[in-house]
Image (cartoon, rainbow, N blue to C red):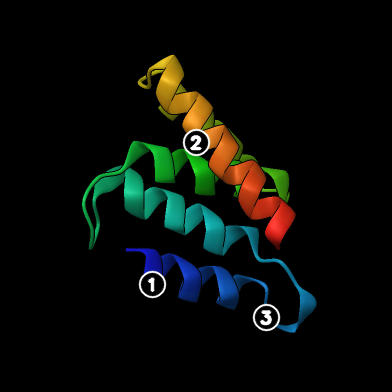
Amino acid sequence: MARFEMNNSGMATMGGETRADTFCEMGLMYATGRGCDVDLISAHKWLNIAAIKGSDRAAELRADLAQTMSKMQLATALRAAREWMTMH
């Protein structure tokens, strides 16, 4: 899964343009288990990044997802998004 994340996140920033819709789709992929195992932490991470990049849809999905997660899961997801944002 990490390889997929790296490839897709790289595509989302190609040409200097950030594509919030790509991050949103990655979040949905992990939330629904489409092509991978369900991973709520990764789903929240990518939806959070998409929301930060301007996706209103991702912000709504992130809020819905957060209601199903524990505080520990949320903290882990927020930390992962913050780390990704500082690296990219």
Q: Is residue 9 left or right of residue 4?
A: right
Give the foreground label among 3 and 1: 1
Work out whether residue 13 or residue 81 is closer to the camera in this orientation and state it: 81
Q: Specify the amino acid type for callout 2.
A: Ala
The residue lying at 48 percent from left, 25 percent from top is: 74
- Earlier sequence position, callout 3 versus callout 1: 1
Residue 64 visible = no
Q: Which mark is residue 14?
A: 3
Q: Quadrant of the C terminus?
A: bottom right
The alpha-carbon separation of the residues under discs 3 and 1 comes to 17 Å
The residue lying at 71 percent from left, 66 percent from top is: 18
Percent position (x, y) of residue 54?
A: 73, 48
Q: Secondary structure at mark 2?
A: helix
Percent position (x, y) of residue 17?
A: 75, 73
The alpha-carbon separation of the residues under discs 2 and 1 comes to 18 Å
Q: Which mark is residue 77?
A: 2
Contact, CB < 8 Å: mark 2 with mark 1? no
